[in-house]
Image: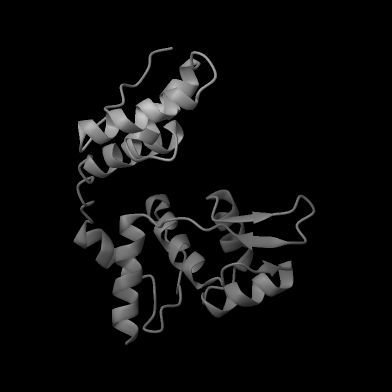
Amino acid sequence: MSKTPLPLHAQDISAFARALSGQLARADGAPSHLELLNMLARSSGFRNFQHLRAQRELMARLAEPAPPPAVVDANRLRRLSRLFDAAGRLVRWPSRRGLEAACLWVVWSRVPARRVFTEAQLKDVLNAWHLFGDHALLRRGLCDLGLMTRTPDGREYRRVEARPTPEALALMDLLRDRAA
C-alpha cells in the first residue's frame, strides 16, 4: 500500500527542536514509529499525528477546484414547468420517461422530512401535491428512485434526505417563483 506524503511545517525551528527534545527526554528508551510521529506532530502544534493528517487532508480538499456549475436546459425546464399548476401541484404524469425524475424530486420536496408515514398518511400528502389521481404511481416512483424508503411490509415510509439534481433545484425555484 502506498503512503500519502504529509508535509510538516514548523513556524519556528528552534521551538520545534525544543519541544521535540523535551518529548524525547521524557520517553522511556527509543520511541516507536507511531510515538515518534506523534512527537513530531505535537512539536508542530498538533494534538497528535491523526490531527496532523486530518488537517492536511482537509486543506487538500479545500484546495481542489469546485466542480463547474451544471447547465440546465431552459427549454426542458419550461417543458417540465408545464406539468405543474400555479400552486405547484403536478397536473399530469409526464409522458416522457426522462422527465419523471425531476417531477418526483419536486414531489419529494413537498414530503415533510424526518417523519415516519403510514401508507394512508403518505397517500394524503401525495394527493395534496398532484391532480391526476394516482398516488401509488408517485409512491412507487419515489421509492424506486431512492427518495423514500419503506419497510418490507409497506407499513412505514420515510423520506430519504438527499441533494436534488441541478435540474430539479431549478424546477423547484421556478415553481416557487411562479407561486409567489
Instruction: State whether residue 81 is above or below residue 151.
Output: below
- Horizontally, residue 135 falls left or right of residue 161, namely right
Looking at the rendered structure, the number of numbered marks drawn on it comes to 0
Question: Closest to the observer: 176 or 7?
Answer: 7
- For residue 156, which quarter of the picture? bottom right
Figure coloring: one colour
- Horizontally, residue 10 falls left or right of residue 92, namely left
Kindly tell me whether residue 61 is visible in this rendering. yes
> In the rendering, at what x and y percent does residue 83 appear?
38, 70
Kindly tell me whether residue 82 is visible in this rendering. no
Residue under the point 20% across and 42% down = 65
- Horizontally, residue 91 falls left or right of residue 78, namely right
> In the rendering, at what x and y percent does residue 61 appear?
30, 40
Question: Closest to the observer: 100 or 5?
Answer: 5
Instruction: State whether residue 112 is above or below residue 94.
Output: below
Residue under the point 56% across and 57% down = 160
Question: Closest to the observer: 94 or 72?
Answer: 72
Furthest-bottom residue in this view: 180
> In the rendering, at what x and y percent does residue 75 appear?
21, 61
Instruction: State whether residue 18 is above or below residue 65.
Output: above
Question: Closest to the observer: 166 or 113?
Answer: 113
Query: Which image quarter holds the N terminus?
Result: top left
Query: Which image quarter holds the C terminus?
Result: bottom left
- Horizontally, residue 42 falls left or right of residue 118, namely left
Residue under the point 74% across and 68% down = 118
> In the rendering, at what x and y percent does residue 73 appear?
21, 56
